[in-house]
Image: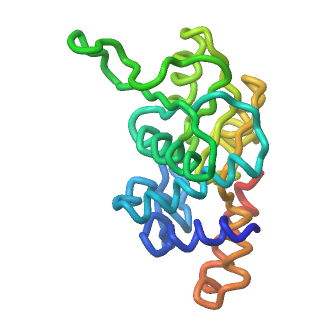
Amino acid sequence: MQPYQEQFLRLAIRKQVLRFGEFTLKSGRASPYFFNAGLFDDGESLDGICQAYATRIDDCGIAFDMLFGPAYKGIALAAGTAMAMARQGRNVPVAFNRKEAKSHGEGGTLIGAPVRGRVLIIDDVITAGTAIRESIGIIRDQGAETAGIVIALDRQEQGRESARSAAQEIQDEFGFPVFSIVGLSDLLALAGSDPELAQYRDALQNYRNRYGV
């Protein structure tokens, strides 16, 4: 695990974006942890997560021309990541969509730079993949192509009807990569080295043994 990944996890824990306990997921599974990126809700924490996105993008070396943030959580994440990348010396265009088209003003469902070239999607997680598939369609309709997806957390667990994870299903279906800042494996590694998190490690490991990919 790289230093920025550990910093990201510690920020998520401090902001209670990442919590431990027993949580019932939409899938019906009882999970020992829960991640809610909506709680990155102030300037400092948003800057922290977006710096982590920018570092992960640089780390993975993917070629792209612009960023796209799916409504709603992806909007702030893509905008913040573009600003973090600009501070690192790379200025890239950014666009996002709204859920409902406007009939006045600029109109339409897209805001920001024209969607062109190779587009990197920025979002928090992939669950059912509905928002991601919608974004892929929007990008394709603009004559552009999806270069890949970067998410904050990959739960690295099987889907309800598949032995593959949601990220793997997207990769297999569309043929482009999905990167994450961290995955469940990174959280397990941190819990194994941090005495304050050690109490959660067995539950995390048991969950991964049962549902992991």
Furthest toward the front, the residue is 89
Q: Position of residue 6 (x, y in %)?
A: 65, 71
Which residue is at 59% across, 33% downward?
Answer: 121
Residue 200 location, x and y as percent?
Answer: 60, 79
Q: Does residue 60 appear left or right of residue 54 in this picture?
A: right
Q: Position of residue 134 (x, y in %)?
A: 51, 22
- Residue at 43% from the left image edge and 69% from the top image edge: 16
Depth check, front residue: 103 or 126: 103
| Above or below for 185 versus 62 | below
In this rendered view, identify the residue nearer to me: 27 or 97: 97
Asked where in the image residue 36 lies, by quadrant, the reply is bottom left
In the image, residue 93 sits, relative to residue 30, either above or below, namely above
In the depicted structure, whether residue 24 falls above or below residue 95? below
Total numbered labels = 0
Name the residue: 74% across, 55% down: 212
- In this view of the protein, which residue sits in the foreground, 150 or 189? 150
Residue 27: where, in percent of width, then height?
53, 46
The colour scheme used to paint the residues is: rainbow
Q: Place residue 120 in its image quadrant.
A: top right
Q: Is residue 207 above or below residue 123?
A: below
Q: Residue at x 50, y 40 (%)?
A: 78
Front residue of this view, candidates 38 and 188? 38
Looking at this rendering, what residue extends furthest in the left direction?
104
Q: Is residue 23 left or right of residue 169?
A: left
Quadrant for the N terminus in the image: bottom right
In the orientation shown, which residue stands out farthest toward the bottom? Answer: 195
